[in-house]
């Protein structure tokens, strides 16, 4: 479909079959792993440069995106591109902000907002989406 291995670490399969990799930037990237063609980086400060097309979304740790309209635009673009490209969503640890963004992609893919966090916890990481306000953000996305 888009070059991610379905069983690879951190790869979430959305109900439509789209694959998106979630990752914690503090974890070293396996040199043998495929590189993304598009990355969305959810950090309070500008991320380091990468060799692929990337977008930075200002999103402080344990919080919500600084600009919610921009977040919707960026996540919608990531979801759209995941149909045929290797899309990566990443934050510092790969759980809270990344899990929240992946849950929003699940909503865009047709998962009801009230169950999107449970979907991501079941199919990506059981500790994804760390705070009550992140869960509420997904329900209202």
Image (cartoon, rainbow, N blue to C red):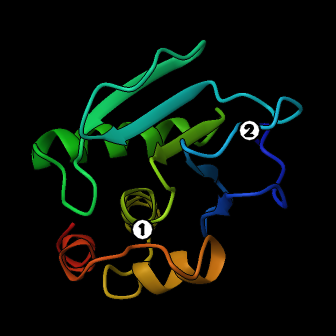
Q: Residue 23 bears which disc, if any? A: none
- The tag earlier along the polypeptide, 2 or 1, is 2
65 on left or right of 122 = left
Q: Is residue 130 left or right of residue 86?
A: left
Q: 112 or 38, which is in the foreground?
A: 38
Q: Is residue 14 above or below residue 126?
A: above
Quarter of the image where one finds residue 82? top right
Q: CA distance from mark 2 to mark 1?
A: 20 Å
Q: Which residue is mark 2?
A: 2
Q: Position of residue 89 (x, y in %)?
A: 50, 45
Corner quadrant of residue 140: bottom left
Task: State the image quarter where residue 136 is shown.
Answer: bottom left
Q: Residues within 10 Å of mark 2 (few under 14, many from 20)?
A: some
Which of the two residues, 47 or 106, is positioned nearer the viewer here? 47
Residue at disc 1, secondary structure: helix
Residue visible at 40% across and 87% down in the picture = 115
Q: Who's the residue at 51% across and 56% down the image? A: 94
Number of dots carrying numbers: 2
Of the 4 image quadrants, the one containing the N terminus is top right
**What's the residue at 59%, 49% (across, down)?**
23
Vertical order, 36 against 17 (above or below): above
Q: Which residue is mark 1?
A: 103
- Relative height, residue 99 to residue 34 (above, below): below
């Amino acid at each position: 479909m888009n070059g991610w291995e379905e069983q690879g670490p951190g790869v979430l399969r959305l109900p439509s079959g789209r694959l998106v990799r979630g990752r914690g930037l503090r974890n070293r990237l396996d040199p043998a792993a495929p590189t993304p063609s598009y990355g969305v980086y959810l950090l309070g400060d500008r991320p380091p440069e990468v060799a692929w097309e990337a977008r930075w979304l200002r999103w402080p740790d344990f919080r919500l995106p600084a600009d919610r309209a921009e977040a919707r635009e960026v996540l919608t673009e990531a979801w759209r591109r995941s149909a045929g490209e290797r899309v990566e969503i990443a934050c510092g640890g790969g759980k809270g902000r990344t899990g929240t963004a992946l849950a929003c992609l699940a909503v865009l893919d047709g998962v009801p907002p009230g169950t999107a966090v449970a979907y991501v916890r079941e199919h990506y990481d059981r500790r994804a989406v760390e705070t009550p306000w992140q869960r509420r953000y997904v329900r209202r996305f």
